[in-house]
């Protein structure tokens, strides 16, 4: 009897153990696993072990997450400075020099101290190798000197009240590593040393890479995620098929009919679509064919093209209603209506209005007629007039826009072809002028200045800069106005300069603005909390490269 009771108690103990201890172990297991945030900042054709922050080909989690900036200017908080590697800055009274005070106690991920020598070296690096200067920062630099181990002073070539906003875009790299690199331009930096929160490339193959926490991060207590994972996503179709499975946590891509094709799949799938800047058709003003180039250079031709476009139809079909037709012939976003002079808008509105009859008359006046009676317009010499439209493959909205534009242009006798390439080739072909027309979007800022500067400043037409000004249209008046804006000391002066830019660019119809889209931002609350959204607009929520505020967003996230 005693033995049977003992056996009974053993049985009861086993049941209790299974009932209470095992569940605890089951729930404890996930906490022992690393918390991984899966992000899709952009599409890539392939994954390369390239973490060189100066090249446009670096992996899309290189900036901010490996190489922390000096300062992040928060665009949703009136450009409030969020201090990172720097703790302060000050401009001289005449706006021709700026001092940065650096943060004490910051270590590189290999344990070496971060000092003014690293900042000095990074600025000097782009002076020695202009190909590394993707933000045209060296055009601002006259000299840079070290005041102390934690202070630097930069003398500017000209007065610039907004110098800090541009200077802090420069990646700061460790001198002790990079001074040993023979060719920084070709260097891929496969094992990066950084000051950001995620510097360890834990795994990398053809399908994904994973970068994990910096063991020496200066703000480690604010990091609540162990690793970032970037899965290879090649195009929009691939993205849409996978996002509904819950694989991704933080993304920023176009989803047609987003309520139906994303949000309806789970109560954890959310999005926020703040207003964004313009999608435009751009022309290559240095296209190789001289007769075609002369045609493109004629403003009457560009205006005729603009008057063929049914902009609302592009919104309805290509963008699934996510956006508004462009109203300003300059391409300035409708976000900045307070900067727009209604007289200028109305003056150029006819060229932004669908009017195929007038477009046909303009094309006829240029002797772009159907000379061989095959139904298509020809160049004055009799050669066929064909406009190729370059778009990135897999960008569904861009490719559909190109298809619709082809139908619209066909109605006035202009033949088009759509050339789709991988994004890297797309950017490269724009950089070297290997196209006739293309569709592109633009970055935006707190004011219209960022759009005008990135899209029309002739200084940004060198290959190392992003694609936005690669129409190669040069205008001395535009360059002068852009140079004047940072030195303007009053709001009224800056508004006047924007008005002049708006009218000058509209009057020349340099591009054909199509529609204003939205900023694409999707987030999955299944695994993480703390997301920025319309109810919690702490900073810009974008995960895109060249969106520095994404670091602020990352540090706000917490695993569930």
Image (cartoon, rainbow, N blue to C red):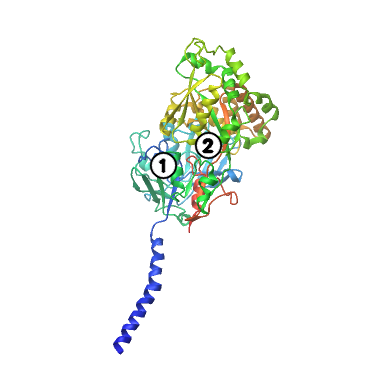
Q: Horizontally, is 30 left or right of 70 in the view?
A: left
User: In the orientation shown, which residue stands out farthest toward the front?
Assistant: 374
- Quadrant of image for the N terminus: bottom left
Question: Is 40 above or below relative to 139?
Answer: below
**Closer to us: 555 or 352:** 352
What residue is pinned by disc 2?
A: 166
Q: Residue at x 64, y 33 (%)?
A: 494
Q: Residue furthest bottom?
A: 1
Residue positioned 68% across, 24% down in the render: 347
Residue 36 place in picture, x, y as percent: 42, 53
Residue 15 vertical position relative to residue 485 in the rendered view, above or below: below
Residue 75: x and y in percent read 58, 43
The residue carrying mark 1 is 233
Q: Is residue 156 visible?
A: yes
Query: Tag 1 or tag 2, which sits nearer the N-term?
Result: 2
Element assignment for label 1: loop
């Amino acid at each position: 009897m005693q033995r049977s009771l003992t056996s009974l108690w053993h049985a009861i103990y086993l049941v209790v153990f299974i009932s209470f201890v095992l569940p605890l172990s089951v729930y404890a297991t996930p906490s022992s696993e690393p918390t991984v945030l899966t992000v899709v900042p952009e599409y890539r054709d392939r994954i390369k072990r390239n973490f060189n922050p100066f090249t446009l080909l670096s992996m899309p989690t290189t900036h901010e997450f490996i190489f922390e900036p000096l300062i992040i200017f928060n665009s949703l908080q009136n450009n409030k400075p969020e201090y990172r590697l720097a703790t302060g800055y000050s401009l001289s009274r005449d706006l021709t020099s700026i001092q940065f005070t650096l943060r004490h106690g910051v270590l590189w991920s290999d344990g070496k101290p971060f000092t003014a020598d690293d900042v000095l070296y990074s600025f000097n690096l782009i002076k020695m190798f202009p190909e590394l200067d993707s933000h045209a920062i060296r055009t601002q630099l006259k000299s840079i000197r070290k005041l102390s181990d934690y202070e630097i002073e930069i003398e500017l070539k000209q007065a610039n009240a907004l110098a800090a906003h541009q200077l802090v875009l420069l990646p700061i790299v460790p001198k002790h590593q990079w001074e040993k690199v023979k060719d920084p331009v070709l260097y891929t930096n496969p094992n990066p040393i950084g000051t950001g929160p995620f510097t360890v490339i834990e795994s990398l193959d053809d399908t994904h890479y994973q970068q994990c926490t910096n063991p020496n991060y200066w703000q480690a207590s604010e990091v609540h995620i162990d690793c970032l994972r970037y899965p290879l996503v090649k195009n929009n179709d691939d993205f849409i098929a996978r996002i509904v499975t819950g694989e991704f946590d933080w993304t920023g891509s176009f989803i047609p009919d987003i309520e139906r094709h994303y949000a309806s799949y789970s109560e954890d799938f959310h999005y926020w679509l703040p207003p964004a800047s313009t999608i435009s058709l751009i022309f290559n003003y240095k296209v190789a064919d001289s007769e075609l180039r002369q045609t493109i250079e004629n403003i009457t031709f560009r205006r005729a093209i603009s008057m063929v476009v049914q902009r609302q139809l592009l919104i309805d079909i290509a963008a699934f209603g996510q956006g508004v037709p462009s109203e300003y012939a300059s391409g300035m976003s409708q976000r900045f209506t307070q900067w727009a002079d209604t007289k200028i808008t109305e003056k150029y509105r006819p060229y932004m209005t669908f009017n195929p009859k007038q477009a046909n008359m303009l094309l006829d006046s240029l002797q772009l007629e159907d000379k061989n009676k095959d139904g298509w317009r020809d160049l004055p010499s009799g050669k066929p007039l064909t406009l190729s439209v370059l778009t990135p493959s897999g960008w569904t909205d861009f490719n559909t826009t190109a298809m619709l534009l082809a139908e619209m242009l066909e109605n006035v006798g202009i033949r088009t072809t759509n050339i789709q390439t991988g994004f890297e080739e797309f950017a490269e072909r724009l950089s070297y002028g290997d196209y006739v027309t293309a569709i592109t979007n633009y970055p935006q800022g707190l004011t219209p200045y960022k759009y005008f500067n990135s899209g029309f400043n002739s200084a940004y037409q060198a290959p190392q800069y992003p694609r936005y000004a690669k129409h190669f249209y040069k205008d001395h008046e535009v360059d002068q106005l852009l140079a004047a804006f940072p030195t303007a000391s009053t709001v009224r002066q800056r508004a006047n300069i924007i008005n002049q830019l708006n009218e000058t660019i509209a009057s020349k119809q340099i591009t054909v603005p199509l529609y204003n889209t939205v900023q694409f931002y999707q987030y999955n609350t299944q695994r993480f909390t703390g997301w920025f959204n319309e109810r919690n607009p702490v900073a810009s929520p974008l995960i895109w490269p060249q969106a520095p505020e994404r670091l602020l967003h990352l540090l706000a996230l917490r695993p569930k």
